[in-house]
């Protein structure tokens, strides 16, 4: 990709991230183009579908979360690693309002542009869960699909005005049902999700 084309693409991603954070995943591509100072055709040339744009936005964060999972495997106890990673995953999903429903649909649809990223994200969480289960730090009657669904539900709750103020409490309740020992039910309470790149 030429340097000017890459610069345009990076600018579009930055603007799209801001717009989707403000307006949610149904934000108008035309509005994104206008705010980026380009025509809609330019947006569509780089990102032919809304899902392609979301995939580009989320892939970087998902890659960071996968790297974080690998780091946590060696730097934290199994229970604490799982809880810390879940908190950051929920924060990531919450960054882009409305993305949770899209992610949940994409993981079941191999044709979705988001499918591979979502599967990789679920895999990172599954490895942390399996490690915690092997150490007796997490219940054994759940799997990575369950954890992905619970994390998605927590992100969705954080998007709802009526429950947003209770999001941290609800996170703790859900985590206490997953982590059985080897990690507090409240680790990372004052740790905020990483800022989006």
Image (cartoon, rainbow, N blue to C red):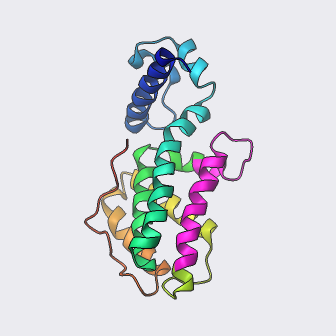
Q: How many marks?
A: 0
Is 154 above or below relative to 114? below
**118 is within the stretch colored magenta:** yes
Q: Position of residue 80 (x, y in %)?
A: 39, 75
Is 193 above or below relative to 70? above
Is 133 above or below relative to 98? below
Quarter containing the N terminus:
top right
**21 is within the stretch colored magenta:** no
- Seen in the image, is 148 located left or right of residue 166? right
Question: Does the rendering let one see residue 156?
Answer: no
**Dominant SS in magenta:** helix
In depth, the one of 161 and 142 nearer the eye is 142
Residue furthest left as drawn: 190
Q: Residue at x 46, y 78 (%)?
A: 78
Is 37 above or below relative to 69? above
Q: Position of residue 99 (x, y in %)?
A: 51, 45
- Seen in the image, is 64 located left or right of residue 161? right
Q: Position of residue 180 (x, y in %)?
A: 46, 86
In depth, the one of 36 and 61 nearer the eye is 61
Q: Residue at x 47, y 71 (%)?
A: 73
Question: In this picture, which residue range is highlighted in magenta?
Answer: 103-131
- The quadrant holding residue 84 is bottom left
Question: Does the rendering let one see residue 170?
Answer: yes
- The quadrant holding residue 34 is top left
Q: Residue at x 37, y 35 (%)?
A: 22
- Seen in the image, is 22 located left or right of residue 51? left
Quarter containing the C terminus:
top left
């Amino acid at each position: 990709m030429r340097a000017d084309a890459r610069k345009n693409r990076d600018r579009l991603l930055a603007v799209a991230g801001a717009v989707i954070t403000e307006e949610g995943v149904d934000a108008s591509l035309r509005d994104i183009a206008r705010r980026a100072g380009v025509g809609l055709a330019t947006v569509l040339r780089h990102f032919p579908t809304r899902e392609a744009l979301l995939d580009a936005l989320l892939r970087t964060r998902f890659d960071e979360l996968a790297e974080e999972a690998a780091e946590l495997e060696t730097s934290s106890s199994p229970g604490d690693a799982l809880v810390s990673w879940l908190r950051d995953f929920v924060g990531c999903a919450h960054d882009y309002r409305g993305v949770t429903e899209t992610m949940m649909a994409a993981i079941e649809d191999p044709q979705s542009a988001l499918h591979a990223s979502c599967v990789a994200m679920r895999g990172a969480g599954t490895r942390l869960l399996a490690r915690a289960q092997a150490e007796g730090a997490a219940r054994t009657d759940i799997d990575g699909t369950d954890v992905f669904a619970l994390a998605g539900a927590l992100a969705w709750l954080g998007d709802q005005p009526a429950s947003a103020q209770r999001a941290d409490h609800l996170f703790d309740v859900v985590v206490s049902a997953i982590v059985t020992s080897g990690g507090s039910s409240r680790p990372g309470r004052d740790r905020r999700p990483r800022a989006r790149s």
